[in-house]
Image (cartoon, rainbow, N blue to C red):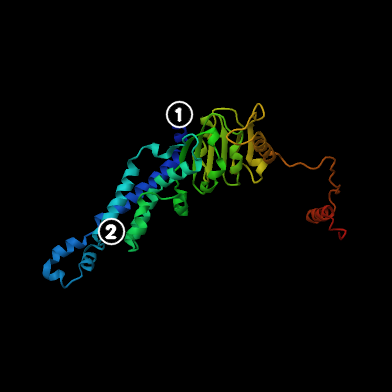
Amino acid sequence: MPSDARLQPALEALRRPIAAYRSYVAAARERVRTLLASDHGVDRARHELGPFGASRIDAARFAALQRGVALEPLARARLDAAAAVLGEIDAADDSIFAADVAPGDSLRVTAARALARTGRAFGAATLVELVRSGRYDAERHDRLLESFAYDWWTRTEREHSPPLVVSVDGADLRAGSLAEVLDVGMHLVLLVRGASTPAPLVRLLTPGTLVIQTGDVRAIGSLGASPGPAIAAVFEQEAAFFTHDPAAGSALWQRLTILRRPASAPAKTLAGISQRQQREELLQLEALAERPALPAGYTAPFIPEGTGDPTDRLTAWLLTESGLASGQ
């Protein structure tokens, strides 16, 4: 695919979560380095004890008494492998936070694979702890260094989630499939190519999730600062532009702001999504952004000022409105 001029600004918008993830990787790498450096080594202990001593003294216990850590050759090899994975990720450039959905492929699968690759840092850290605690099992745990799926991440790991920028054709943008990864510290940017449905991210509106649809990559500058999950889609062609900001209020209509509506109604089916379904996206967006209003002709009951305690007057009014005051 040709280079997308929006990619670098999108990565810059994610600088904070990128730094948080890289900090986690660096700390994990330092832990395994320390562990390896403190390993006296069972083989070395046997050598120091000599044939006579080794036949009468437990070499592993002797090594542990000398330096506090004793690793069998297999355990040390696994720690070396974990250190190599962490070193590889630590040295990688920001392209590890980008993925491209080939035309016709699955957005969800592409995102899951990309996260499983960067998730190897969490897998390596997990493997280190398994080795340290003596619970390491090669058959079960070696795969942690090859791929570490989002489903396996702990809450702490999700708080340090590696962000992801995904380039995708509008026809393949099934945003609802990303809902399962929008947890705690996940930050996603979708760079949409070509025509798409008008409001695909409306399916991801939840109280604590920052959601942005825009045509200007500069509008997502605040994305990386979001303390909770966040997702933005940057479109090339016509779409509804809106922002759902969890910090803007407790009610949905306060959090959701429609910045621009499509100039015309959807004109044709797109990748199996009918005109009606596309119109429903827009209607749902409008409905969610609508501010509640009292019914037409409604008149609030008159309550004279200074009549009794304000709490009692409010309670009496609520009971009257509900019909409970008359025993209904």
x, y percentage for residue 7? Answer: 45, 32
Image-based side of 187 in relation to 43, left or right: right
Amino acid under label 2?
Ala
Tag on residue 75? 2
Callout 1: SS: loop
Tag on residue 4? 1
Q: Quadrant of the N terminus?
A: top left
Q: Say which quarter of the image contains residue 90.
A: top left
x, y percentage for residue 83? Answer: 30, 50
Image-based side of 249 in relation to 225, left or right: right
Which residue occupies 83% across, 40% down? 296
Amino acid under label 1?
Asp
Q: Residues within 10 Å of mark 2 (few under 14, many from 20)?
A: some
Which residue occupies 58% across, 39% down? 201
x, y percentage for residue 302? Answer: 86, 47
Q: Quadrant of the C terminus?
A: bottom right
Q: How many marks?
A: 2
Spot the residue most to the right. Answer: 326
Which residue occupies 67% across, 36% down? 276
Front one among 316 and 84: 84
The Cα atoms of the two marked residues, 2 and 1, are separated by 44 Å
Compared with 184, 256 (above or below) is: above
Image-based side of 192 in relation to 135, left or right: right
Which residue occupies 54% across, 33% down? 170
Compared with 265, 50 (above or below) is: below
x, y percentage for residue 160? Answer: 44, 48
Compared with 250, 51 (above or below) is: below
Front one among 248 and 160: 160
Spot the residue most to the top. Answer: 263
Q: Earlier in the sequence, mark 2 or mark 1?
A: 1
Compared with 282, 51 (above or below) is: below
Callout 2: SS: helix
